[in-house]
Image: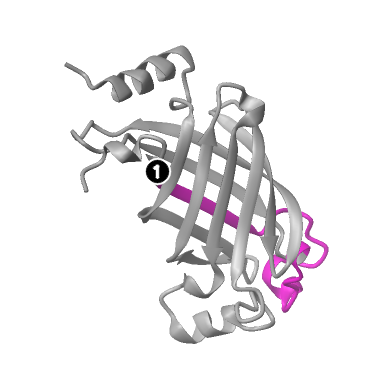
Amino acid sequence: MIPSAFAVVLATAAANPGLPAPGTYRLDPTHTFVEFRAQHFIVGAVRGRFEHTTGTVIVAKDPAECSVDIFIEAGSLSTQDPIRDAELKATDFLDAAEFPAITYRGKGIRRSRSGWVIDGILTIRGLARAVPLEFTFEGIAPRRPGWPPRIAFRASTAVQRAAFGIIRELGDHVGKGAGAPDVWVAIETEALRQDLATTAKN
């Protein structure tokens, strides 16, 4: 027999394809991956990730009430090159000492061709900019007795580094006068339903 809480998740997902059941979900930091690709010397790219990310996703019956709140530790950036990492965390780029948090807060979702879009505010170096985040709901993990439902999302967006005050060597990196995005971000995450967390084993 399927546990009643999981039955609710399945029933709601069936009624609203593309989204999990309404509830509050906490990102699982050990299964959350925030990766980026930044244009470098016009023809190349630098790739990296942030090692520490936390956040909350609220799924509501009304799409306008769905929301996301993500906190990324700027100092957790890693490109697998310590010298470059130190440079990117310094004042010319992320300035992680002065602005330790990169945040994304969004509310209200709408359909897209491949899934959903949430309109939110991305804050880097203390500068807040409106940035839409495209995402898809990847599904519900197999049920583990005594544990809350686990869901998965994939999301992506693209921004211009100049919008956040990162302009050092910008012309050399992306070309003078370029107006297109030059940093691409991809997020893969799993999240646990919190309003059913009391059913988990102690």
Q: Is residue 169 magenta?
A: yes
First to last magenta residue range: 163-189
Q: Is residue 99 magenta?
A: no
Tell me which corner region of the image, top left, top right, bottom left or bottom right, holds residue 101: bottom right
Image check: 8 left or right of 145?
right
Q: Amino acid at mark 1?
A: Ala
Camera-side residue of 91 and 12: 12
Helix or strand or loop: what does disc 1 sit on? strand
* x and y, in percent, of residue 50 in the image: 47, 65
Image check: 6 left or right of 67?
left
Q: Residue at x 31, y 18 (%)?
A: 7
* Residue sticking out furthest to the bottom: 83
Q: Residue at x 55, y 46 (%)?
A: 156
According to the picture, the residue beneath numbered tag 1 turns out to be 191
Q: Residue at x 68, y 83 (%)?
A: 91
Quadrant for the N terminus, please. Answer: top left
**With respect to residue 65, does 93 lie above or below?**
below
